[in-house]
Amino acid sequence: MTTSSGPFLTAADRLAIARAVAERSADRYGELAEAFAMSCNPATAEAFQAVAALYREQADSLPPAPPPPRGALDWFEHAPEIADPDSVHYLMLPWHVFDLAQRAEDRVHAFYRDQQATAEAAASQSRRDDLCARRDACPKPHPGWWEDEDGPNWDAD
Amino acid sequence: MCGSGGAGVMTAANMLLDAAADAGYYALFGRSAGPQIRGGEAAALVRLSAEPVTSVDDTTEILLAIDWQNVHRFAAELPLDGKCVIITDPTQGEVPEVMAKSGARIVELPMKDLAKEIPGGRPNMIALGAICQLIGLPIDTVTEVLGKSLKKKRADAYEASVAAVQKGAEAALTMGETKRLPTVSDKPNRWSITGNEAAGLGAVRGGITFCAAYPITPATEILEWLTSALPKIGGTFVQAEDELASINMCVGASFGGAPSITATSGPGLALMTEALGMSLASETPVVVVDVQRGGPSTGIPTKSEQSDLNIALYGMHGDAPHLVVAPNSIGDCLFTTQWAVHLAEVLQSPCIVLSEQSLGQSRGIIPAPADIAFVGKRLIAEAPAEGEKFRRYALTNTGVSPMPLPGTPGCQYTADGLEHTETGMPSSQAGDHFAQSDKRLRKLTGYEFGDHWATVEGEGELAVITWGSSTGAAREAVMRARADGVKAKLISLRLLAPARHDAMAKALAGVKKALVVEMSHTGQFHKYLRAEYDLPQTQLLNRAGPLPFRPHEIHSRLLAMGGK
Amino acid sequence: MTECTAMTYTAKDFKSDAKPVWCPGCGDYAVLSSITKAFADLGLEPHKTAVVSGIGCSSRIPAYTNCYGFHTIHGRSLVVATGLKLARPDLTVLVAGGDGDGFSIGGNHFLHSCRRNVDMTYVVMDNRVYGMTKGQPSPTTEADWDASAMAPPGGTGLTPFNPLAIALSAGANFVARAFSGDPNGTAAIIAEAVRHPGFSFVAIMSPCVTFREEQREWKNVVRPAEGEPATDAAEAAKRLMQDDGYNMGVLYKGDRRPYRPVTGSGKTVADLDIQFAL
């Protein structure tokens, strides 16, 4: 399966992929939520929990499906990873969380669009709009939001 | 002050310390942090005083939380009672139940919201202003400190910080009374320094020119300080691949004539014991600073304990008499390390300096240390005796035999861990082993260590016998007991090995009851004292780390022992 | 309790409830995912798998898995794991740690573990720094990196350790490099490493977001290694000595004899008395 031109998906494949994407997204965002609870950033942890809940709900709304065929999700594996130093920062804000999620959903949308899976693409767009709305409802990150006067090598001098 | 993830607690506490220093006060500044490397929960523990201070107090008189993220984990380190004040931001979580039920007065200060009213304002500066107002530290001392650190670099940050400090001070006017600083009339000569920095400085003052080391919490700061200091004075610093390499490199450098030091903690000292034996048997001086942490094994790397006494005293195999010393305050880290270098060089022995995390990683505003001219002076051999083969391990009166610097003609010898003759040739003969064992022992036991062996203060029929960081709390307890009519002596050992029987007997003259105080679960110091010294009727006050002894704990035991 | 028919475990089943304390953005999160995914893909069972580590940020990993684990002491993970595997060859043993733990204090054991070639897999999360002690240079740190209070100005000036070349020349049977930014690729490499007999070494580039911020550039410079893994040691050596450190993939798959201890001959302890009796 590729994101550019290639064989179009069967209905069964589409279901399997949709369910897997939703479940893995819910897991990833859930893990991120835990990481930020550990990093004493509760607002961001909550935001990740909200996003995880969104995907958990989506996964639960789909009928059960077998795992997708091998390689079918390779395009998805560049979705936000808890370990990407460019995606996350221990001081990031809820605005960043929803922005990260909507960018990830945009990639999902691009996949469905390329596969001409119109129903899934529409659903994805609607999720993306929701995430953008949640982002825009958050206070914008203030300048210097990443600054922590107490560095890791803190020394009282 | 506590908070997490970017709250800037340490920065604010540091500024408080600097401001108090500028105003003429003494201080002690320790910290606690969670396991995260960035952003985790952190608590800055500051004690300010008009007199030199070397101990934590009984309670946390003011506890200010910028937020309460996981702060309940520090609850045991922040004892509270009804006379204390908890300052909390109502938008940043509830006061943890364990703290609220202490009976402390709870006051609200909306630091986050107040900070928002100032462009670029931060809650930690609001907090700083409020604290200074409450304790009576003039605000302009804080703005001066801000000026020094910010004005040149970032003028807008300076403006915002000053405004926030002032706003915090204003808000504090309606927060009621708290404990206030006594006024000070002058500014005595003081230093701002951590125990680890002091140990590094003590080392170079003592004449160290070589350090090979491996990073380990909580000793790393000594090594970081020496990394930049040693090259400046013509010395050498090497980061080695592990502790085995570190200690062996140091002994090698010392063999070449360079007074050498390394610094580590319990796990590293455990690795070094074999090479320390080599230093001892070959009579090549070396100094190891062990900044003790929670043990055993990996233990609690970021917390203090006094539980490496056993390995320091007994860690080497064989009959292994050597030097063990221990500083009893931040300032004493300087003197004791310097003294250790001196002793190691003069007595050609390994010397272990038992420091502690609570001394090493805490900052003190302390009386400026005296400049004592204890420079390690090795007894150098320049030539063999007329017509003789050079005897490196000659059986001299003092037990100290001159050692040559490699490069000196006629004095070549092979240093050896093997038992040896006077000329250094390996020997398995009983006579040589008896003679050399005796030499290595009497060079230490026959040495005049002088008054530095212990800090002995006061008079009385009671005595507190302690060492290391417990000394500060013991000293305060003894003072309180005296005020209560119970006269007690403080005996804090700086020289732990070799034992000083005559000096201890003199210190204990007239003492009928003793209280041994130590942070060791198995009472290592108490057992050592009983093995080496004649003690009067003795009780033990001990526990494992990480909680330091507070003066009232020792004070109440003294009153009970004194029949009050 | 009787053995039920083998369950299939998912990657989640290999993770414990303990929450990692790593900084958000740390490459080790992805490595944890890769390891658990590899275990699941291999069809392993958590209770028959052991994860052994040393000391450092990445060495915290055993507690985050649901396997049997041992968080040993600094630099000694390989030898503790060797003892475990020799006593219990039925277990799957994975050793994990960082570059400081593995190549500095652990260097001697690294050499001899490669040479001994016991069947286990060693995963090193290399971030070219000592993270846990706040940022000192490690053996894989670049010679000119000096953003550390314990590095001389201008850097250590020391040639960085080349762990893959050393592993090969010391006798390891499988040598690979991976990148935490490609968790699926890393999982596949780890699975292959576990499957391959003998000592398998996987060096995983895992950026430190706190002390080596510049490592976020790694994702722009890493590339898949060209060609098949070398099976000839001399050819592999040439490749590795010319490698610039950014080629990902299995670089050597050998057929060196894995360690086999001497097997028994069925005697009992009582039989041993005979040699002394007169």
Image (cartoon, coloured by chain):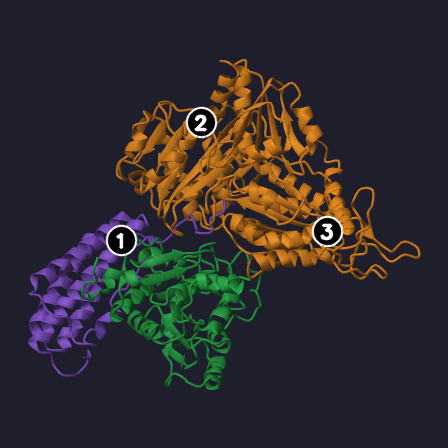
Which of the two marks, 1 or 3, is nearer to us in this view?
Answer: 3
Subunit bearing disc 3: B
- Sort mark 3 into few (<14), some (14-19) or many (20+) by Cα contacts within 10 Å: many
| Quarter of the rendering containing residue B247 | bottom right
- The residue that label 2 is drawn on is B58
| Quarter of the rendering containing residue A30 | bottom left
Considering only vertical position in the picture, is C88 above or below B43?
Answer: below
- Sort mark 1 into few (<14), some (14-19) or many (20+) by Cα contacts within 10 Å: few
Question: Secondary structure under badge 3?
Answer: loop
- Sort mark 2 into few (<14), some (14-19) or many (20+) by Cα contacts within 10 Å: some
Are discs 2 and 1 located on one and the same chain?
Answer: no
Question: C256 or B467: nearer the eye?
Answer: C256
Name the residue type under label 3: Glu
Callout 1–callout 3 Cβ contact below 8 Å: no
- The residue that label 1 is drawn on is C17
Question: B450 or A38: nearer the eye?
Answer: B450
Question: Secondary structure under badge 1?
Answer: loop
| Quarter of the rendering containing residue B239 | bottom right
Q: Which mark is residue B283?
A: 3
Could you tell me which residue is drawn at 17 percent across and 74 percent down? A111
Residue B359: x and y, percent? 54, 39
Instruction: Judge left or right: residue A75 versus residue B307.
Output: left
Q: Which chain is green?
A: C
Could you tell me which residue is drawn at 20 percent across and 56 percent down? A135
